Amino acid sequence: MKAFGIFDEEDEAPAVDLGKAEEATPSEESDKQGLVEHAVSIPASSLLLFRKGRQRYAVDVQYVKEVHGGLNVQKLPLTSPYFSGVVIVNGAVVVVAADEIIYSQVDRQNNTQSVSNDETFIIFEIGSDHLAIKTNEASQVINVDEVSIRALDASREGSSRTFSGITQFLGESVLILDVLSLVHALKS
Amino acid sequence: MTKKALDMKVLLVDDEPELLNTMKMCLDDFNVLTAGSAEEALEVLKHEEPFLIVCDLKMNGMSGIEFCAKLRENQVNVPFVILTGAADRDIAIKGLRVGLSDLLDKPMQFETLLSTVQKHYDLAIKEKQRYIEESRALLLTFIEEARDLMIDFEPSILALEEHPDDKAGIDRFFRKLHTVKGSAASVQGGEKLSKLAHAMENILTLLKEGRYTITPQLVTHFLECNDLIGRYVDALEDGHSPPDLSEAIVVLEQLLQNPASKTPHPVNAQISKAKGNLESTPLEDDGVLVSAEKLDRFMDIAGTLVAFKNGFDGFVRYVAQGGQINLASLENMNRTIMKISDNVQSQIIDVRKVSLAKTFTKFPRVVRQAAAELSKQIRLDIVGQELAVDKTIAKALGASLIHAVRNSCDHGIERPDVRKAFGKPTQGLIQITAIQIGKTISIIIKDDGAGLNRERIVAKAIERGLLDKSKADKLSDEDAYELLFLPGFSTAEKVSSLSGRGVGMDVIKTTAINLGGTAKLTSSTGVGMTLSISIPILTTVMVEKSLLVESKDILIAIPLTSVSEIKPLKLSELTLIQGRWTIDFRGATVDVVDYRDVLENQATCVGKSSSSDGSLIVFISHRSRLLGLIVDNVLDQFEAVIRPFDSIIGGVKGFIGTALMPSNELAFVLSAEDVINRSDKSTGSPKEIERVS
């Protein structure tokens, strides 16, 4: 995972209450209502940062198997709200989770304002299951300071299902994707 | 690991305490036992088994040589080293005849003592390892043999009840039990198992002689004993503490003394206990038993492959040295490798097959227990258990069908008085049939009970908000019964130990779907219920010669076994009948559909999008049913290596898996059976029809 690049500790911005931030970015603004005061404990020691549109996200690196660019998403024989198709990674067929099941409607609207047209796939390995998500960039790994991660409240429509918390990185809010919940949502 | 950590001890014997103490200090690395005389040493040896005895020659009382001779007389063969001064060396040498291992000179050279003890320690360790390996090998042989023999134990026990006069059957059971008993006695830790088998044998002996009457209590206890034997064998294999057999042996002894007496536990309690054991049987991957004959066939293939490899290697060298490439040779090599590949594939499929008999073994007992618990009379008939299926299927079916059997016992079969009132035989019947039709395995579980109560199912679905009241009347029986497969859905008023939680049918359906198959319920009130499960033969990796077609930008592989014919789509040949487009094909009227419309339950709109001229109809068939599938293009024929969908995506309606093309594109492998079934059920309204001229 170090290939993604480890950030120096001094690069990490201290966790702040977004409600007190002087200048919030548009995505931060949208996150304000989703914040509560409770810290979230996640077992990860490192997070892979990725970007979807203008929003930064992160995911526990222990589930990340590979990061790939230039994969061709092939359609499934049926339209599915859960999967946007499949990709072939090293000869294996991996399903790609649809944005609709990962991100809330608000996030998806923000995500359309992409800073990059590149498609980068994060391939997760969860036990014997494999799953891919589509991002615009995934290149950095940061160490986790657990107290900096805060819970999302239920009012944050849709997100609480697949995101376990929110943190700060270089002044930007970063939503933490909960891979296990995502897999559970897809399977159920 | 230090030498002291192992239970390996050296016994030092000398009547001079100072020397004894010095030797002990010298051997500080070892576990040391000491004795001041041969007599004392003999006492120590009653409790200890040292790997070496180091003993002074001259001692008060028994001498070292006399001590050694006594040990050898008593078949104690521990290596024995004598300490002797130069004056007595001749005596000591003569003593070698009684079985001394070594002589150590006095005055004592401690380095020599240390190296001698170390030498014997190393030898003892090697011997111990050899013993452990031999014991383990013996144990594994016993476990394999016992498991093989035990397959028949449960059916044999149940047969005692059904055919108490079948002396030949009792004899067969006795012989197998006797073999297990004998083998158990010969392995470490197997003595108690042997005693249990012996106690069972005692009763079987009386049964054979007609001096004992079989009772339900005896059968139940024998079943419990069988469970205990299984768990004991498992524990021996895993190196865990085996279960306590003493209580079971006491019960057998009581039963032996007084055949008419009750067992110490009420029958129902014993049934519950036995059932608990059944339910907790883990679904471990216990591998596949491969016969030597099948392995020989693999050896043959390996030989052919090596021969081919050698030939190919020579060919490559020949070409590398400027030799001409001969097309005929290449074609010949291609044919050979294809033949080897086919052979490997078919042999692997064969090896993975196991008989369903093992899967069905537990059902007679389940039915017996349920019948006893519910005060019902139920007979179980199993047909086709000799059918060999892929191990994955056998295992999954074993775990899920038990729910269907229990449901039939609990909800299907009526109590004897109720059956009598309806003019039925008091004994109900559950029939399990396993058959293979083409590349599909069908498991049919049928009972002659009360059948499903459609009204109650629908009412429950409405009550739970699963069904709109206005749609309830229009629901077909099949769709109403389908509700029973929903997770947590049950019409049972109360949960019993057998069923009623609404889990079992869900498990059955999920298992069938996960195996790429289907599960369906049919019923007739008062006559009985039938559960039909269809599973395609292989669900791991299979190779299927397939037709590659393109439809709506998706590549679809249709197994050639399902393809009847391909013809161009001519709109003029199509007729709209009751909202479905049809075509005359070989004298029959066949529906013509687009796969996606079928799977999304919509009527196919011929003339728009995909269904334009230039398209083709691929006629697919399953059993005797046909369906015309509209495709944009037929691309190729190829050998599809089919992989099932992974657990995240689960099943994709109408498809059994994926096949990766050499171009790295993905084709979805169509299930003709599923598409035809769905097409039959399709209720979509016809869309506006636009014919293309």
Image (cartoon, coloured by chain):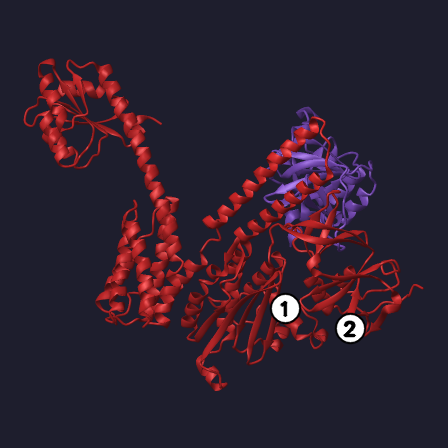
Q: Amino acid type of disc 1? A: Leu
Q: Which mark is residue B483?
A: 1
Q: Choose top left, top right, bottom left or bottom right for residue B55.
A: top left
Q: Quadrant of the N terminus of chain B?
A: top left
Q: Nearer the viewer, residue B432 or B243?
A: B432
User: At 51% from the left edge and 43% from the top edge, which residue is drawn?
Assistant: B299
Where is residue B649? Give x, y as percent. 67, 51
Find residue B587 and name its label: 2
Pinpoint residue B392: horizontal percent, then vertical percent: 55, 54
The image shows residue B327, relative to residue B171, as above or below, that is: above
- In what quadrant of the picture does the C terminus of chain B appear? bottom right
Residues B256 and B174: in front is B174
Residues marked 2 and 1 touching at CB (< 8 Å)? no
Of badges 2 and 1, nearer the viewer stands 2
Horizontal arrangement in the rendering, residue B98 relative to residue B465 (left or right): left
Protein chain holding label 1 = B
Graded by Cα atoms within 10 Å as few (under 14), some (14 to 19) or many (20 or more), the crowding at tag 1 reads some
Query: Which residue is drawn at the image coordinates 42% and 66% (left, top)?
Result: B365
Q: Amino acid at mark 2?
A: Gly
Chain for colour purple: A
Q: Quadrant of residue B583?
A: bottom right
Front-most of residues B83 and A49: B83
Q: Chain of mark 2?
A: B
Which tint was used for chain B? red
Query: Residue A99: image x %, image y %?
Result: 75, 47
Which of the two residues, B623 or B596, is positioned nearer the viewer here? B623
Q: How many marks?
A: 2
On the question of residue A12 being in view, the answer is no
Q: Are marks 2 and 1 on the same chain?
A: yes
